[in-house]
Amino acid sequence: MAKVWLNNLNCSGREKHLWECPGPPGMDVSVYTKDMVKRITCSEEVELRLNGYKCAGAVYYTKKPENSSTYFCNNWDQGDRWANYVCDRLNCGKLKEPSDLRLFNENTLPSDYNRVSTQCTSSKQETHPWQCDPQPSNCNNPAVVICEGHDVWRIQGGSNRCSGKAVHGDGSPVSCGENATHSTCDKMRCGTFIKSECDEQNNTLLSCSDNITIFLKNNASGENATFGEVHVAAHPMGAHPMGELPVCASKWKPENSKVVCKELGFGAVIGTSFVKNRTKGILDDVMCSGDEASLWDCKAKYSKAKDKPLQCNHIAMVTCGACIRVRLSDGPGRCAGRLEMKVAGMWNRVGKRWTAANSHVVCQELDCGNALPNLLLDQLSPGSLPFLNKMFDCPQQSQNMSNCVGKDFAPKTEDQRPTMLVCEDHLEVFVKGSSWCEGQVGVRQHDSSYWLSGSAATWTQTAANKVCQQMHCGSAMSHRSILFHDSTIPGEKVWPREYSCSSKEKSLFDCPLSDTTDNSTIAFVTCAGKVMHV
């Protein structure tokens, strides 16, 4: 004997809910004396399904025998109760990640479909989501679930994002025992399945019908630029190729730019901007986490249908670190001077918002050793190029600026003083003798001085011309060698490097190093020009 919710009901058939039927004595007070309560069997059969894939898609239910389909609105679930219910009911594990319709292609939803909003009771007595008082609705988006059983393969490496070595969503290799199907390529937005085969390491090499390539494009460099608009080259097999289409920039995130530069092997992101342009696009609302191997792997709206392209209002422009070039201008040598940087095709001076760590990276990139921050070159010309409006943060052990992350800033007046830089491998040539333009040739590094070897193999007319030109003394009238022990100017050792010069180099230190070494002689030169000191 136990209490029951309802008993002795007298329904007319016109009531909408069972508890509207009259019947004494009331809810939760009646006692039922028999061993079994009432059970009923309804004429309709309700089946829960996903439109998309087996374990991910828009949630709907069908009623049989009428075979109607109804989608739940995306406000159906307060918390993850029904999402986990759907995943469990379909043998797909638990809910994997927040629901997002962007994971699915443009044909996921029918053009016209029934939608209902639901309102479950606070007591949570409903055992199925369609029991939560479904009401017709015109909501914009259906409820979407992505369960643990939904695994999207990706391509590891390579420019074509639809063919190559396959890996699971977590990055682990796909073994040869795992069969690919049509849905495998469809999940990847790569068309239809062509074939899969094994490599020598028992990994799966997947081939899908489409050929998808991400690239940057600008007017100066064309395709494969290190900065420019983000484009996708889409060439579906068996159809008219869409060709090259830009990526729309709605809700663009910094992580998207990071993935683009990483995918293309172009270093860190140093800038992102947006071009206003109403045009056709292939991706929009791109949302990367930053860990993806390709922009094509990120969540996004997309359309490869030639008659249904996306409409862009803005296009993303990304500048990657690989576009950076550095130089030290107007200095006494290749490894010292005013720091100038080329970014996105334009040379600029670097102002005072600069760090010692960044200076080391520049010197390393120029193959000039480390920076010597305590040496000043304030006597150099300040130059006339515009100042760069970017700051850089270089990681430790970096050897080139392409790996340094850049961000924009508005330079202040005090920032607009050029950075002068001296690297430890900075070398100066000097002549010591009867005049500025005649005498023994030496090499100065930091505070140490050395004599240049007068080896017959390397101390040539061409090398002598380089020295005179660096001394602003014109060309060499004559050159010769003297024995080290005959030098009338004591003190310096012979510089341990010799240079094999040709007409191509601008200075002695640009010449290739020679394999020969001769410490017994010193170079001597007489230049044609004269320098007057005032």
Image (tube, grey):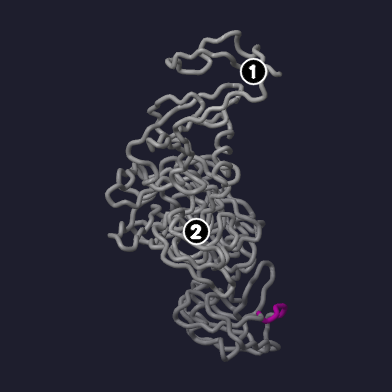
Q: Secondary structure at mark 1?
A: strand
Q: Position of residue 98 (x, y in %)?
A: 54, 40
Residue 325 visible in rendering: no
* Residue at mark 2: 263
Residue 123 against residue 306 in the figure, above or below: above
Q: Quadrant of residue 97?
A: top right
**Residue numbers of the magenta segment:** 490-495
Image disc number at residue 306: none
Amino acid residing under circle 2: Glu
Q: Position of residue 36 (x, y in %)?
A: 64, 25
* Residue at mark 1: 4
Return the residue found at the far bottom: 456
- Are the residues at dot 2 and dot 1 in contact (C-beta closer than 8 Å)? no
Give the spatial CA distance, label 2 vs label 1.
64 Å
Residue 61 against residue 174 in the figure, above or below: above
Residue 418 falls left or right of residue 214: right
